[in-house]
Amino acid sequence: MERQESVYNLIPKNEVKVEKPPRYVSKFNERVKQEKQMNKSSHKTMGPPKAVIPSPEKFLRKYSKGPKPTDKMSTFKEENIKRLAISTRCDNTWMRTQSKKDYVKSNVMDNILSPPRKPQPSYAFTKNGDKQLLENSGLVPKYVNKKDYGQIPEYLEQRNVEERRAQEEYDEYVKERLRQGAMKQLSDEERLSTLQGLKKNLEEMHYQFQCLSIVIDTIPKRNYKERLELQMKQLERDIDLFERHKTIYIANN
């Protein structure tokens, strides 16, 4: 942006004249004017001024624009018609096409000898006797008759195999660690004896907790009570752990 007051503004500037390009002129200008004068100026009214009027004697005649059809009825004569002879009542030619089979008797015998139609099993679901098919009610044991009824699905068998494989790998890993001497497995006797000792300690702690005074008005009594509660909770966790898991390992270090 130029400032309002500047020394450079005092220098006179030369005016630059912009020269415009010459105007575009179509080379078909004269031809278009001539065609307009030839084709449109004469049709400014309803049609050209000198129209060719047809003569009233030259009217459209029948079959003038197409071929004339041939007259077939003129060549047709009655004596050329060959009429068929009507058969009399005494004539027995119509009996030749009649079959010797008695369809009425055959249909009667077929219906007599046919087995009776078994009714479809249905059930009534209203007191007025409205019925529905028993098959669509869900009372028919369809799935019991399947071949794979009562069998374990394939995905469950596959999952059982994977769980069995994972358990075997875990057992092998534990055995390998045991061979290395990293852990020691408790026997059943040791586990039961440890469990009995934990229960005995819990009974003693419980007896000490019951022997507390009803009114705990000093800080040492309150601390002693809290310590007994923590020890009892820890013993309950250990007892639950020993009862739920039959295989227990202890680290040597």
Image (cartoon, helix red, strand yellow):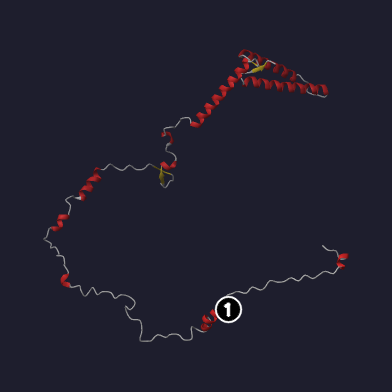
Left or right position of 64 against 219: left
**Nearer the observer, 86 or 229:** 86
Left or right position of 99 against 11: left
Which residue type does callout 1 highlight? Answer: Glu
Q: Position of residue 239 (x, y in %)?
A: 66, 20
**Nearer the observer, 244 or 166:** 166
Name the residue that disc number 1 marks.
30
Residue sitting at x 19%, y 50%: 102
Residue 162 visible from this viewpoint: yes
Left or right position of 78 against 64: left
Query: Quick check: 197 above or below 23?
Result: above
Q: Position of residue 74 (x, y in %)?
A: 21, 75
- Quarter of the image for residue 183 reads top right
Quadrant including the N terminus: bottom right
Residue sitting at x 21%, y 50%: 103
- Quarter of the image for residue 10 reads bottom right
Q: Secondary structure at mark 1?
A: helix
**Nearer the observer, 113 or 19:** 19
Q: Position of residue 147 (x, y in %)?
A: 41, 32
